[in-house]
Image (cartoon, rainbow, N blue to C red):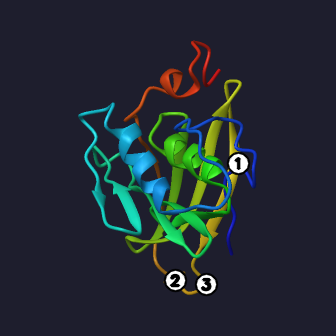
Amino acid sequence: MTGGAGEGESGVRGLRGQPSGECGMGLLDVVKAKLAAYPSITYEADDRSIAVPPASPEGFTVSLELEGPGCIVFYEGWHQHFESEEEALNCFGLGLTSACRLRVYRRGGRAYRWTMQYLKEGRWWFGGTVGLLFFPFWRRREVVVLRNDRIPIAELEGREDAGE
């Protein structure tokens, strides 16, 4: 089962960029250039992907992988496929802000479902759920809410009322 932010409409803009059309190799360079404005953010990259680890145990890893003509943005186990570079950048950037949170469902300490939510007009909206088919359902259930605060949402939006 898959789902995710937006299908074109997450309601919040991410790392604004000029690229459009299919995801290509230049997309990773755009992400690296945008992240360079935030020296406290570290990342790992290769020729097909980039990943930003969480700054604390309360955060989650945000990554982007090129896949065929499109790309996939991951928030740990949650993911969304994109054909548009702009939409992928938006989703990637959103995951680095406090305007996005990830509900992680675990059984026996093992994650099996991830639900993304985003903040819009002061309310949390459902962005999609991804889950595993097989998991230890007989084990004790735990739900944790993870949230990054790596990039101020107002900077991403380019306006002062961002995220409200």
Task: Indicate which label's residue lies in the foreground, 3 or 2.
Answer: 3
Task: Say few, some or many: other residues with alpha carbon within 10 Å of mark 1 (under 14 / 14 to 19 / 20 or more).
Answer: some
Q: Is residue 134 above or below residue 100?
A: below
Q: Position of residue 153 (x, y in %)?
A: 51, 27
Q: Earlier in the sequence, mark 1 or mark 3?
A: 1
Task: Report the front residue among 107 and 130.
Answer: 130
Is residue 79 at least partly visible in the picture? yes
The secondary structure type at the circle numbered 2 is loop
Q: Is residue 13 above or below residue 21?
A: above
Q: Which mark is residue 126?
A: 1
Q: Which residue is mark 3?
A: 133
The secondary structure type at the circle numbered 1 is strand
Q: Which mark is residue 137?
A: none
Amino acid type indicated by mark 2 = Phe
Residue sitting at 36 percent across and 47 percent down? 32
Mark 3 in CB contact with mark 2 (< 8 angstroms): yes
